[in-house]
């Protein structure tokens, strides 16, 4: 992730830091991703820091163990994701004189879990993501729902940013263990019910900026019109 800033100041005033009015997701040759965060308007000054609250919703399903290329030295998708999050923190830390940034982390696989009860610093986020491991299915619904809950607790006046990172198609939905172990859905494929649950969850998010980052997504997926359960 990368923040691009432009400088804007007036005569006799403290120089203010503004983000450029653009938004893109770029995959680098080393498997990392740059995001220019689209946050229009003044970010803050040295005397009055702007507040930015960022929720990261991270896919930790089993396929995140896969490597990003056939190169023997290639990192896994999850390792690249962690590196990208660290780079995001570093980018905001570089603007710490004018920007007060806090974070929350949600991970999702077969189910989802908010890993941070409270808003934390970039240093705390870096320590938290070290413990993420990849396993299970892909429950967009619960990841996005918990992301929505997390961003709802943002500080008054803060710019609210949600970043959703995934490498695969949604295969589960719901939080109930309908057969004693798994939630609704096929577990390996996408049903229409699974997709619609994910869309509803995404629609429930109320934030200033939302970014969906696809990591090695398939060119297409099959959407099954009937639902199924994994036994």
Image (spheres, rainbow, N blue to C red):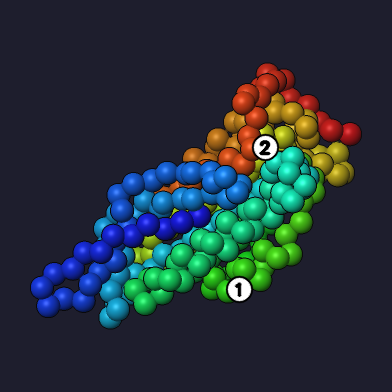
Mark 2 is surrounded, within 10 Å at the Cα level, by few (under 14), some (14 to 19) or many (20 or more) other residues, namely: many
Measured along the vertical axis of the image, is residue 176 above or below residue 12? above
Q: Is residue 50 left or right of residue 121?
A: left
Residue 168: which numbered mark, if any? 2
Q: Position of residue 224 (x, y in %)?
A: 70, 20
Location of the C terminus (image quadrant) = top right
Q: Nearer the N terminus, badge 2 or badge 1?
A: 1
How many discs mark residues in the rendered view? 2
In this rendering, position of residue 136 left or right of residue 192: right
Q: Residue furthest left?
A: 11
Residue picked out by circle 1: 124
In the foreground, 19 or 34: 34
Of residue 230 and residue 102, the one placed in the foreground of this image is: 102
* Image coords of residue 132 (percent x, y): 73, 59
Who's the residue at 51% across and 61% down the image?
Answer: 88
95 left or right of 133 in image: left
Q: Is 102 above or below relative to 35? A: below
What SS does tag 2 mark?
Answer: loop
Q: Is residue 189 above or below residue 10?
A: above
């Amino acid at each position: 992730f990368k923040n691009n800033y432009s400088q804007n100041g007036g005569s006799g005033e403290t120089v203010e830091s503004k983000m450029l009015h653009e938004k893109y997701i770029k995959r680098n040759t080393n498997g990392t991703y740059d995001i220019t965060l689209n946050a229009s308007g003044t970010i803050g000054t040295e005397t009055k820091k702007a507040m930015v609250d960022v929720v990261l919703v991270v896919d930790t399903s089993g396929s995140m163990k896969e490597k990003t290329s056939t190169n023997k030295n290639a990192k896994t998708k999850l390792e690249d994701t962690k590196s990208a999050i660290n780079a995001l923190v570093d980018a905001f830390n570089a603007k710490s004189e004018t920007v007060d940034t806090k974070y929350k982390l949600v991970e999702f696989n077969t189910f989802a879990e908010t890993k941070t009860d409270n808003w934390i610093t970039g240093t705390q986020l870096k320590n938290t993501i070290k413990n993420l491991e990849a396993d299970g299915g892909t429950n967009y619904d619960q990841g996005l729902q918990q992301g929505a809950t997390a961003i709802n607790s943002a500080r008054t006046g803060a710019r609210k940013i949600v970043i959703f990172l995934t490498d695969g198609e949604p295969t589960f939905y719901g939080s109930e263990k309908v057969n004693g172990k798994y939630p609704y859905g096929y577990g390996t494929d996408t049903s229409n019910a699974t997709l619609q649950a994910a869309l509803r969850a995404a629609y429930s998010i109320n934030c200033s900026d939302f970014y969906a980052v696809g990591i090695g997504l398939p060119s297409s997926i099959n959407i099954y019109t009937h639902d199924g359960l994994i036994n």
